[in-house]
Structure formats: C-alpha cells, structure tokens
Image (cartoon, helix red, strand yellow):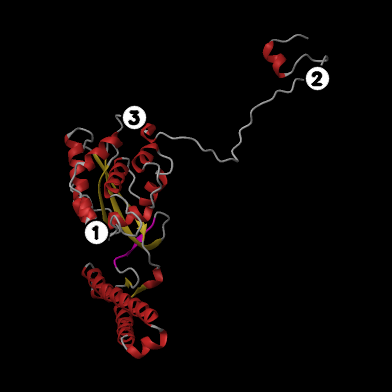
Amino acid sequence: MRGDKDSEFNAGEVGKEKVRRVRLKLVNREQMVLRPMDVERLVPEDHEVRAIWEFVGGLDLSRYYEDIEVVEGEAGRSASDPRLLISLWIYAYSKGVSAAREISRLSEYDPAYQWLTGMEPINYHTLSDFRVKHKEALDELFTQVLGLLSVEGLISLERVMHDGTKVRACASADTFRREERIRAHLEVAREQVEQMGDPRTAEEVGPRVAKARKRAVREKQQRLEKALTELEKIRACKSSPEEKKKARVSMSDPEARIMKQSDGGYAPSYNVQITTDGKEKVIVGAAVSQCGSDYGELVPAGL
C-alpha cells in the first residue's frame, strides 16, 4: 500500500518496515532562561504610557520630595521616585485599575508597567503608602489630569457609569457595643494609661516594652473615643428613642457600618463608590460611603 508523503511520515508503509519514529523538540518548562531585554522596545513610540511619563515629568513635584529623608552621600536605601509612583497610578486609573496590589502584580509582566518601572519590581506597600500619605494632593492632581485628558479628547465624560460595592471592614460583628459598654471599656483604658505612666512599672518591664504597652493602650483609648463620636452619628439617623438606645458601633473600626452583602448576609463594611467614563473605561471618581444603600450617592459624585 502506497501513501502520500504525509501518511508515509506518520505511519510508513504497512507490512514492510517498522513505523518511523520521529524526533521532536520537546517543550521544557522546568528551566530558567536568561535573555537580553531592550526595555525601550517594550512599548511603541506612540504608546500612552510614554505620554503620561513625559506629562508627569513636566509637573512641579517638589511637595512629594520634601518628606524623603535619604540623601546622597549618606547611608540608607534609595527612595522610590515620586514621578514613577504618580505615573503608575495615573496609568493604572486609565485602565480601570485602582488597587496597589494589582499594580504591583501587573508590573511583573505587563509591558507598559514594566517600561515605567524599568523592569524593577514595585512593592504594593510603597504604592499604597504613597497614595494614602499624599491623598489630598494626589486627588487634586488626578482631577487635573483627567480634566486635561477630557479637553484633549482622550476621554469623554458625556456618559459615565456609577456603581457601588461593599468592602468588608477590619472588624468582626462581635466588636459592636452599645454606649454603656464602650464607656466602661474607655474608663478601663484611661486607668491603664495612668498606670503605664508610673516610672516604677517601666523599670520592671523595661523602657521599650513599657513604651509599647503605653502606646497600645493609648491607641485603644483613641479608638473608643472615636467610637463614641460615631455612635452619636448613628443615633442622629435613628427616628425613635428606642432605636437610638439600641444603637451600636464597632470598638475596633468605629467608622464601619453593618451592611448587607452580595451573599445575603450582613457584615461590617464600607460602601465604595466608583465612577467610570463610559467610553474609555477610565475611573474618573471614587468615594467611600457609610451608607448601606447606593440611593442618594449620585449627587455626592457630582452626577
């Protein structure tokens, strides 16, 4: 039996000789590969990430450098460049990414993020701490950048999408207490602060341990005082005296509120509101609400 070339390659001639055994180059994934990388060629010349980098480089960023303590000629690890951190956040927002962990993860394989960082890993703590530390200044900066993008026609704010999602707080349901319990704990915390101030106690446990304990008790006292303030806010929203009396607040995260979750349960949470440009999918607004419902959140968002 004679076959064509392909059948001969796969099976050979039946009944004559044994089947040909082809030799293939197998894929080996259990290896480390070292190869040269031209970072500049990771993204094309007209890529938007290059425009963002140049734009941020032309801004006055002096306020972000004032708090950097490490200087040339002295010991200490070099600080991350604020220009890089700002560029990363702006580019991430333009792609609908708002989490520091996700930016850090994308920096490991996404060409645009790799180009910004120069193939260097970026820790999500660095991104998050920078965003929180300079929140007001960065909010204003990002607003101006979004306004400029809108003027240049890069994004359109004619149609936006707005929605909220419940984010669980760092508090469990059993941390919620009424006023009597909170005041009782607050009194205990004050007594502990006074006892921690006794120098004889500090000598017994050591100065460092004593300071750490005193700081922990002081922070607990501050949380309890904050809880009483938040409790008054909750009571102001209640209509009847009975509801006001039953009002409770978390002692570990006083600003959290009990909210219904997507699975039907209830948990201490925050209501995160996100506004996104309908065309370019760019996040143009973000806010956190203590209200369990999205009703009434469009007006605060400026829509």
| Image position, residue 169 (x, y; %) | 36, 62
Please tell me whether residue 201 is drawn above or below residue 215 in the rendered image: below
Q: Nearer the viewer, residue 69 or 207?
A: 69
Between discs 1 and 2, the one toward the N terminus:
2
Disc 1 secondary structure class: loop
Q: Is residue 111 visible?
A: yes
Residue position for label 1: 67
- The percent position of residue 168, horizontal first and vertical second, equals 37, 60
- Label 3 or label 2, whichever comes before in sequence order: 2
Pick whichever of labels 3 and 1 is earlier in the sequence: 3
In three-dimensional space, the C-alpha distance between marks 3 and 1, rounded to whole angstroms, equals 35 Å
Three-letter code, disc 2: Lys
The amino acid type found where label 3 is placed reads: Pro
Tell me, for residue 236, which label it has, or none.
none
Tag 3 near tag 2, CB within 8 Å: no
Q: CA distance from mark 3 to mark 2?
A: 53 Å
Q: Which residue position holds label 2?
A: 18
* Front residue (pair 166, 252): 252
Please report the residue visible at 59 percent of the width from the left and 38 percent of the height from the top. 29
Front of the two marks 1 and 2: 1
Q: Which residue is mark 3?
A: 44
Question: In the rendered image, which quarter is residue 194 located in?
Answer: bottom left
Magenta segment, which residues? 255-261
Drawn side of residue 4 relative to residue 45, left or right: right
Residue 118 coordinates in the image, percent (x, y): 37, 41
Q: Is residue 288 above or below residue 157?
A: below
Residue 127 picture location, percent across and down: 33, 52
